[in-house]
Image: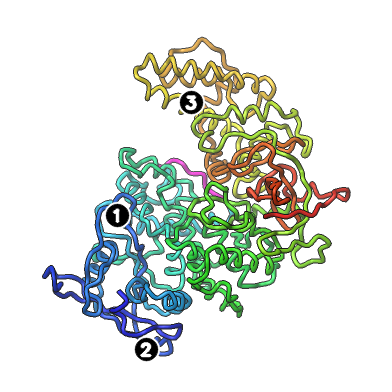
C-alpha cells in the first residue's frame, strides 16, 4: 500500500479521507473510492471532520473467518482492506460522505513504522479536534439493532438511578427484572432486548484498548448502524446500570442457551463497556454528567489521594482500570492509552515522559520494563508490581517476573478501581516519599527490596471454576485443618474462610458487612447440586445418572466432618445435598433428617439486601485459589501457587507477594499478589520483625 502515499506525515500533519463510489478497474463492481488529503494541525481548526472508531478484525466473534479481504480504491489505486472496514466505508459513504473522515488504517501509512509512531503520538489531537467520532460495530443485523435500541431506552432512563448508586457507594442487589417498574419506573427488559444487549456487548469493538481514547477525547460520539446514528453514551450508561443494579445476570439468563458463544460470560464485553464509559466520563472532566459522583470511585490504584501529580501516576490509574482489553501489537497496551494520557497530563500541566511516547522500533520487553521503572520510581511504591498476572497468562517471554504485561483477561487486583468507601490496603505500612530505611531499587532486570516471610504454602484449594463446578474438597480440607479460632484476628475460622474468599469486601465496605452467611451457604449448595444435576443429565440413562449422583454424594463425607466441627460454615451437610437433589428429581426421596436451619435455608430466598456471594467470588476468585500457610495464615493467591511457595510482606508493596525461590540465581520469582486475612492493614509489621534483603528476578 506504500505506493499510494505521495507524502509523509509527521507530528505536525495528518491525512483525511473523502469517500465516494467508483468502478473497480478489474471487477467493474461499484466500490468505495477513498481520496486522501494532507492537512497541518495548525490549520485543523478550519476543518470540520469526523473520525472513525472500529476494529480491524472481525466485528463479532461468530464470524471471525467468514469473509476475506475486499478491494477498494485508495487515491485511485486498488488496495485490499479487511471486510469490517469495507462495510464501514459503504455505510459512511451513504450516511455522511460530505464530511471528511480520519480512518487509521488508510490515513496512516501502516508500512512506515516512523510514520505510524508519529501519528500514534498525536492521536489526542486527531480525535480531540474531530467534530464527531463515529463508532462502527459491524454490518447491521436484527439482534445488533435490537441491542442498540434497547441501550437507547435503558441508558436514557437509568442515568439518575446509576448516579444515585455510584454517589451513595452502594448496590441495589436486584435480581428480578419484573421489579423494574416499581423500583425504577422503567419497563422490564424482555427476552428480545436481552438477546440484543448481549449481542451488542459481544461486539469485538468493546474489547479493543484503542477505543478508550477514541471515544474519550471528543464530546460527540455516535454509533452508526443501518444508516442511523445512536448516542454512544447510552451503551455505557446501560452497562453501568446493569452492573450496579445487579440486573446483568438476570438479563443473561433470558438469552437462549442454544446460541453459540452467547452463554459464555467471557465473550461478553460487558465490563469493558462500563470501564470505557467510566474513563470517558473521567476524561470529560467538568463536562461530564458524572462529575460529582466520580469522586466516590478510587482511581488512585491503592495510593491515597495526596500523592503528587505525575504522568506516571495517571498512566498507572489507566492501567489499573483498563484491564482485559486486547491489542494486536502488545506495545499498544501502553501506546493505546497515550492519547488520554496526554489529555489528562495537559489538564494538570504535566509532561509525558519520553518512555511513554510511541516507538515501534522498541522491543516489547524493553518497553514494559521501562514503563515499570518509571512508574515505580515516580510513585515510590510497588503497587505496580501487584498488576502482574498469573504466570499461565503472561505473554511476554524474557520479561522480569515483577514487570506486568497486560494480557486480555478479566482479572481484578486488590488495587482495582472501586468505591472509596472500601478503603485501601497497606500490608507493609509503606508511606510513599517519606524517609525510608528500607528502600527498594531497580538494578537492570532485578528488583531489590526488603521484606519478611509470613509463611510457606502448605495447602491450597480449588480454583473458582472448579468451585463453581462443585469441586471443593480441598477447600474443605483447608478448613478442617485450621484451628477453630483464627489466631491472627480471633474470629471463627469458618468465618475467616468466607471473608478470605471475597477479600473481606462487599464492594461497598471492608470488612464486608453486606454479606449474609445464609446466602453464602446457599451459593455453595447450588454449586454442588448443579454439578450433580449436570452429571445426571449427561449420563446414558436416568438410572445410570442416579447411581452416579449417589456415588458422588457418597464421597462427600468431608461435608459432615466440616458440619461437625463448624456447624455454621458455608458448606452444606451431606443430608442437605441429598434432599436438594431429591427435590430436583435426580435421585429418589431420601429418608434423612434436616435441622431447623437447613430446612429454613431451602425455603428462604436469597436476601435482597445483601451482595450475592457468587457475584463477589466472580470478582475476587477468578485466576486465584485459597492458600493456607504453615504459620496458620489463610489467603488467596494466584492459580499457579504451589506448595512450598513463600508469602512475603515487601516494603513498598500494599499487598503480600507470593514468591518462588530460584536457587540457581539466588533470588525469587514473583508469582503474584495475594490477599492474606489479618495482615492487609499492616498488622504483621511489628517492632520485632526482621526485614531481609531480597532480589526479585
User: Disc 1 versus disc 2: distance between alpha carbons?
Assistant: 36 Å
* Mark 1 crowd level (few <14, some 14–19, many ≥20, 10 Å Cα): many
The residue at the point 34 percent across, 42 percent down is 255
Q: Is residue 289 visible?
A: no
The residue wearing badge 3 is 529
Closest to the observer: 420 or 409? 409
Residue 263 spot, x, y in % from top left: 38, 42
The residue at the point 61 percent across, 58 percent down is 403
Judge from the rendering whether residue 492 lies leftward or rightward of residue 191; answer left or right.
Answer: right
Task: Kindly report the secondary structure that dominates the magenta region of the rendered protein.
Answer: loop
The residue wearing badge 1 is 144
Q: Is residue 488 visible?
A: yes
Q: Quadrant of the C terminus?
A: bottom right
Q: Can you tell which mark lies on residue 46?
A: 2
Q: Are marks 1 and 2 in contact (CB under 8 Å)?
A: no
Q: Count of labels shown?
A: 3
Q: Is residue 155 magenta?
A: no
Helix, strand, or loop for circle 3? Answer: helix
Q: Earlier in the sequence, mark 1 or mark 2?
A: 2
* Mark 3 crowd level (few <14, some 14–19, many ≥20, 10 Å Cα): many
Report the magenta residues as a range: 170-178
Closest to the observer: 417 or 318? 318
Q: Earlier in the sequence, mark 1 or mark 3?
A: 1
Helix, strand, or loop for circle 2? Answer: helix
Amino acid at each position: 500500500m506504500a505506493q499510494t502515499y505521495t507524502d509523509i506525515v509527521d507530528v505536525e500533519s495528518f491525512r483525511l479521507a473523502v469517500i465516494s463510489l467508483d468502478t473497480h478497474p478489474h471487477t467493474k463492481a461499484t466500490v468505495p473510492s477513498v481520496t486522501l488529503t494532507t492537512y497541518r494541525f495548525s490549520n485543523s481548526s478550519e476543518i470540520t471532520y469526523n473520525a472513525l472508531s472500529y476494529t480491524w478484525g472481525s466485528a463479532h466473534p461468530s464470524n471471525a473467518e467468514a469473509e476475506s479481504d475486499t478491494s477498494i480504491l485508495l487515491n485511485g489505486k486498488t488496495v485490499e482492506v479487511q471486510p469490517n472496514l469495507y462495510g464501514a466505508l459503504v455505510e459512511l459513504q451513504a450516511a455522511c460522505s460530505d464530511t471528511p473522515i480520519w480512518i487509521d488504517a488508510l490515513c496512516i501509512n501502516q508500512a512506515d513504522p516512523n510514520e505510524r509512531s508519529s501519528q500514534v503520538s498525536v492521536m489526542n489531537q486527531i480525535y480531540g479536534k474531530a467534530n464527531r467520532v463515529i463508532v462502527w460495530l459491524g454490518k447491521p443485523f436484527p439482534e445488533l439493532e435490537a441491542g442498540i435500541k434497547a441501550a437507547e431506552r435503558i441508558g436514557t432512563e437509568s442515568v439518575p438511578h446509576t448516579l444515585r448508586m455510584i454517589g451513595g457507594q452502594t448496590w441495589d442487589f436486584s435480581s428480578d427484572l419484573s421489579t423494574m417498574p416499581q423500583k425504577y419506573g422503567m419497563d422490564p427488559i424482555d427476552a428480545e432486548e436481552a438477546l440484543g444487549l448481549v449481542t451488542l456487548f459481544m461486539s469485538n469493538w468493546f474489547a479493543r484498548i484503542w477505543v478508550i481514547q477514541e471515544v474519550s477525547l471528543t464530546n460527540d460520539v455516535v454509533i452508526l448502524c443501518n444508516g442511523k446514528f445512536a448516542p454512544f453514551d447510552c451503551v455505557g450508561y446501560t452497562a453501568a446500570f446493569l452492573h450496579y443494579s445487579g440486573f446483568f445476570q438476570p438479563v443473561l439468563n433470558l438469552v437462549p442457551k442454544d446460541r453459540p458463544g452467547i452463554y459464555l460470560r467471557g465473550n461478553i464485553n460487558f465490563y469493558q463497556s462500563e470501564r470505557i464509559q467510566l474513563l470517558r466520563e473521567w476524561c470529560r472532566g467538568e463536562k461530564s454528567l458524572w462529575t460529582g459522583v466520580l469522586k466516590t470511585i478510587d482511581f488512585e490504584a491503592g495510593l491515597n489521594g495526596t500523592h503528587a501529580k505525575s504522568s506516571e501516576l495517571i498512566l498507572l490509574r489507566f492501567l489499573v482500570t483498563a484491564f482485559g482489553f486486547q491489542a494486536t501489537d502488545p506495545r499498544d497496551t501502553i501506546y493505546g492509552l497515550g492519547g488520554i494520557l496526554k489529555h489528562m497530563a495537559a489538564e494538570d500541566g504535566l509532561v509525558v515522559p519520553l518512555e511513554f511516547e510511541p516507538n515501534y522500533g522498541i522491543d516489547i520487553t524493553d518497553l514494559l520494563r521501562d514503563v515499570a521503572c518509571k512508574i515505580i520510581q515516580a510513585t515510590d511504591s510497588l503497587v505496580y508490581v501487584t498488576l502482574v498476572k498469573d504466570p499461565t497468562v503472561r505473554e511476554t517471554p524474557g520479561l522480569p517476573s515483577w514487570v506486568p504485561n497486560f494480557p486480555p483477561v478479566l482479572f481484578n487486583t486488590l488495587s482495582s478501581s472501586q468505591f472509596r468507601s472500601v478503603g485501601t490496603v497497606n500490608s507493609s505500612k509503606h508511606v510513599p516519599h517519606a524517609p525510608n530505611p528500607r528502600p527498594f531499587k531497580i538494578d537492570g532486570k532485578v528488583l531489590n527490596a526488603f521484606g519478611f516471610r509470613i509463611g510457606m504454602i502448605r495447602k491450597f484449594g480449588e480454583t473458582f471454576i472448579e468451585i463453581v463446578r462443585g469441586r471443593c474438597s480441598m477447600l474443605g480440607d483447608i478448613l478442617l485443618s485450621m484451628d477453630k479460632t483464627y489466631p491472627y484476628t480471633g474470629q471463627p475460622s469458618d468465618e475467616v474462610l468466607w471473608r478470605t474468599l471475597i477479600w473481606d469486601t462487599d464492594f461497598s465496605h471492608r470488612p464486608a458487612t453486606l454479606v449474609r452467611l445464609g446466602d453464602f451457604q446457599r451459593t455453595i449448595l447450588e454449586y454442588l447440586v448443579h454439578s450433580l444435576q449436570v452429571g445426571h443429565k449427561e449420563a446414558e440413562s436416568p438410572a445410570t445418572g442416579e447411581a452416579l449422583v449417589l456415588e458422588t454424594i457418597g464421597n462427600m463425607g468431608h461435608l459432615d466432618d466440616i458440619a461437625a466441627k463448624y456447624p455454621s460454615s458455608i458448606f452444606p451437610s451431606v443430608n442437605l445435598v441429598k434432599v436438594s437433589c431429591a427435590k430436583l428429581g435426580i435421585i429418589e426421596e431420601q429418608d434423612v433428617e434436616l435441622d431447623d436451619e437447613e430446612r429454613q435455608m431451602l425455603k428462604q430466598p436469597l436476601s435482597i439486601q445483601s451482595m450475592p456471594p457468587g457475584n463477589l467470588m466472580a470478582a475476587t476468585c477468578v485466576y486465584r485459589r485459597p492458600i493456607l500457610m504453615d504459620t496458620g495464615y489463610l489467603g488467596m493467591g494466584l492459580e499457579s501457587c504451589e506448595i512450598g511457595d513463600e508469602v512475603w510482606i515487601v516494603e513498598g508493596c500494599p499487598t503480600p507477594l507470593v514468591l518462588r525461590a530460584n536457587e540457581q540465581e539466588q533470588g525469587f520469582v514473583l508469582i503474584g499478589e495475594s490477599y492474606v486475612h489479618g495482615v492487609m492493614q499492616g498488622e504483621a509489621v511489628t517492632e520485632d520483625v526482621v526485614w531481609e534483603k531480597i532480589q526479585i528476578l
